[in-house]
Image (cartoon, grey):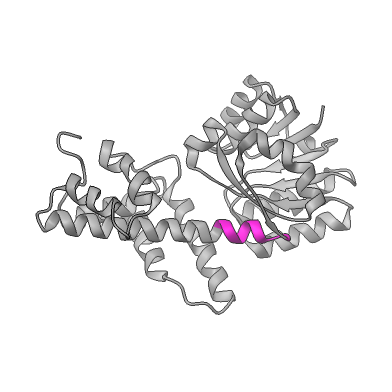
């Protein structure tokens, strides 16, 4: 039975940890939130009292954290996990983080004979709960192979991608997020303008879905707003703007111009509705500014 340390038990990590336990791994878990730690213990994990206590003796360390600052602190900080792991261990870092922090953590890990892959996920909270996340991994092939049984406990085996060397997973996840939030703004604009022009929302949506402008966001993801006014509070605007900032920073570092206007719109939505507002709050912003509500007839 592989000994796994799992650090970070938030909206995504809590479900992911539960699936790792259910798959038969021996799991120690840690989070700063005592309620999250209690839930992990109820699912069968051992509740650790610190990062170092959690990582001590683990063969695999999984981290699912809010952002680069937390990743650096948990892995490389005083009392961090890398210092507690034994040589030969493997780190599976599943946060949406920066390539810079990833490189720093990788160097620290290698200095102690520890392997590391970056393996951020996509699929929203519903995918984490169902164990059907897509996983985007970067790292050496041998390390990816060691991690694969654990990754298959967390995600859909058909959507686990080994993309190349360390950093590849981080980069693809940032670009995925950038594309998704561009689609959110484009969809909000198209639907709001169409409804203001007097077009029936159902007919407008159907026409766009069956046009060359279709996207998975337009066809599927936006439905949670149209069906029930759900802006998806499972992923908060403070994390949305963090992820967009990382994607824009990556592009700027590479000398590539990107749609920073999309980042600005999401910052405006965060300012209007708060840090904890749902990730589709940009659509709500368009609704409020245009004075329309994008709902099917008869829906709240």
Left or right: 245 in relation to 140: left
Q: Can residue 133 be seen in this view?
A: yes
Asked whether 76 or 213 is in front, the reply is: 213
Q: In which quarter of the image is residue 99?
A: bottom right
The magenta segment: 165-173
Q: Quadrant of residue 190?
A: bottom left
Q: Can residue 79 be seen in this view?
A: no
Q: Which residue sits at x=75%, y=48%?
A: 144
Q: Which residue sits at x=73%, y=36%?
A: 149
Q: Which residue sits at x=66%, y=60%?
A: 168
Across and down, in percent, residue 246 comes to 54, 63
Across and down, in percent, residue 227 comes to 27, 37
**Location of the N terminus (image quadrant):** top right
Asked whether 184 or 41 is in front, the reply is: 184
Across and down, in percent, residue 92 comes to 72, 46
User: Is 78 one of the magenta-colored residues?
Assistant: no
Left or right: 197 in relation to 173: left
């Amino acid at each position: 039975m592989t000994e796994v340390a799992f650090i970070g038990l938030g909206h995504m990590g809590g479900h992911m940890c539960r699936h790792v336990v259910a798959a038969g791994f021996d799991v120690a878990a840690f989070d700063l939130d005592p309620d999250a730690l209690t839930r992990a213990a109820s699912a069968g994990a051992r509740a650790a009292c610190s990062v170092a206590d959690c990582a001590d003796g683990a063969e695999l360390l999984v981290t699912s954290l809010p952002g680069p600052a937390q990743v650096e602190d948990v892995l490389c900080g005083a009392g961090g996990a890398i210092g507690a792991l034994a040589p030969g261990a493997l780190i599976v870092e599943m946060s949406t983080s920066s390539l810079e922090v990833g490189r720093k953590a990788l160097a620290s890990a290698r200095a102690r004979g520890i392997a590391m892959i970056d393996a951020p996920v996509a699929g929203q909270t519903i995918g984490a709960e169902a164990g059907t996340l897509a996983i985007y991994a970067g790292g050496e092939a041998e390390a990816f192979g060691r991690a694969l049984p654990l990754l298959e406990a967390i995600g859909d085996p058909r959507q686990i991608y080994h993309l190349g060397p360390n950093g590849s997973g981080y980069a693809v996840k940032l670009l995925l997020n950038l594309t998704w939030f561009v689609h959110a703004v484009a969809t909000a604009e198209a639907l709001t303008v169409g409804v203001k022009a007097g077009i029936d929302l159902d007919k407008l949506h159907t026409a766009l879905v069956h046009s060359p402008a279709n996207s998975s966001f337009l066809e599927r993801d936006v439905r949670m707003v149209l069906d029930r006014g759900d802006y998806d509070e499972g992923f908060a605007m403070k994390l949305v703007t963090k992820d967009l900032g990382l994607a824009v920073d990556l592009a700027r570092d590479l000398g590539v111009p990107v749609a920073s206007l999309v980042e600005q719109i999401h910052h405006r939505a965060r300012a209007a509705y708060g840090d904890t507002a749902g990730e589709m709050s940009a659509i709500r912003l368009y609704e409020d500014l245009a004075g329309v509500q994008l709902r099917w007839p008869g829906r709240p």
